[in-house]
Image: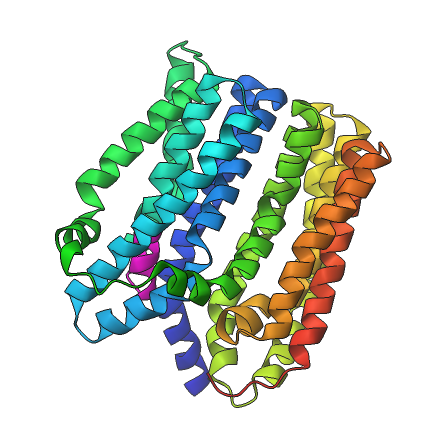
Amino acid sequence: MSGLKRIESLVKRFGSITLLRAFSATGLILFSSVITWLYGMDSFGQVSFAISIANLILVIGRYGSEYSFFGRYFDLSSQGETDKAARVLFEKCRLSLILSLSLAIVVVPLSFSSIEIIVFCFLYIVGFAIIQMVSLSHRVIKEFYRSYLFEAGVFFVFSSLIFLLLALSGNTNDVFVVLSACLLAYFCLFSLFGNKKLLQGFKLSDESEGIKLSQSLKQDSKFLAFTLSEYVLFWGIILISGYTLSEYDTGVIAWGGRIFQLFVFILAIRNSVQVPEILASNDIKQSYLKVRKDGVPLSVAGLIVSSLAVVGVYVVADLDSNTLVIWSLFALAACVRLYFGPVYHIFVKFSADKQVYTNCVLTVLVCVLCSGLALSLSTGALGLAACYLVTWLVSLIYADSQSLGGHYGRV
């Protein structure tokens, strides 16, 4: 009976989080489907490229603070010092916005000539530089519903509905004009319902304890490597293809990334249940190895389902063979990722082992270098996808072996 009670408590604790993650994670997939259906693969590739650049700027602007800076926010909130916590949030939002805008002013105009795309990128960067920080502030104190209320995934659901309504009314404006309008509407909703903590921090900003910029950057720098490696996982290949391949090829690769994201959502559900059990055990490494065995049937099942799905889409949509192979490669890489389970959650997010962070840096560099090699050989989208995914999987295996070589006690 104790085992059943334990399962019941886990379900109650993480069930709502899983539902919120499901809504957030599937938002981008819904958005991708709507844009591809209404505007075609070329436009979807262009939109994905613009978002990949904006997300890279946001990752650098946050500077890894989601894993270090908000530890201080959690400490202050748990001690009942809400005013100080609000000041911490405001200071971090301001710093993130300054860093993001400084980078955007240089990168965005050099990447695009269309004023519509440039406006969209700046709106996206400015809005989510603030919104993502506010969402994280709710997440660290376990206000999960508030955390996922204003997330990028929810925005993509919101904008998808707008696109569908416009399509039903026969209105097909420029995709980036509609997206910019959706961003403005979404940020207005956030201003009305989601910025209470931010305003509180702004009012008290004169009383800020004044964390020095150099001190903050030094604290967060080691976590930037991990957030960049996460970016490489979801967006890096889209960024590279956007600069080097056609818009259509970029769209095909971006859809491969969405296939991968579906599997990562399955992984998130698995981690929601298994990570607390692993971290509560006396021997974290052995608990992780035991849990990883469960990933074998899950990976096999995922491979079978994904193969049937990809072949079905290929037949119905009458796609070329290269597209089928590219999507199959992403599905295969996702199945391998399922096998390793919560390796990054256990040994990176919580343990912060230096070897793993070194691997994160190597992952970014090796994926970029190998992608450059594939492109120099004129292998096209298929060669880029194959080379990129193989090098990423090798780095994942290496990270797993390095993580298991460390010593971890009870967290």
Q: Residue at x 68, y 57 (%)?
A: 363
Of residues 18 and 80, which is closer to you in this image?
Answer: 80
Of residues 172 and 385, which is closer to you in this image?
Answer: 385
Q: Quick check: is 144 in the magenta stretch?
A: yes
Q: Is residue 397 above or below residue 374?
A: below
Q: Measuring from the top left, give residue 139's x and y in whole percent.
A: 33, 60
Q: Residue at x 63, y 37 (%)?
A: 238
Q: Quick check: is 340 in the magenta stretch?
A: no
Of residues 14 and 99, which is closer to you in this image?
Answer: 99
Of residues 305 and 320, which is closer to you in this image?
Answer: 320
Q: Residue at x 50, y 72 (%)?
A: 275
Residue range highlighted in magenta: 133-145
Q: Main secondary structure of the magenta part?
A: helix
Q: Is residue 218 above or below residue 239?
A: below
Q: How many marks?
A: 0
Question: In this rendering, would 85 be left or right of 124?
Answer: left
Question: In this rendering, would 18 be left or right of 348?
Answer: left
Question: In this rendering, would 254 be left or right of 83?
Answer: right
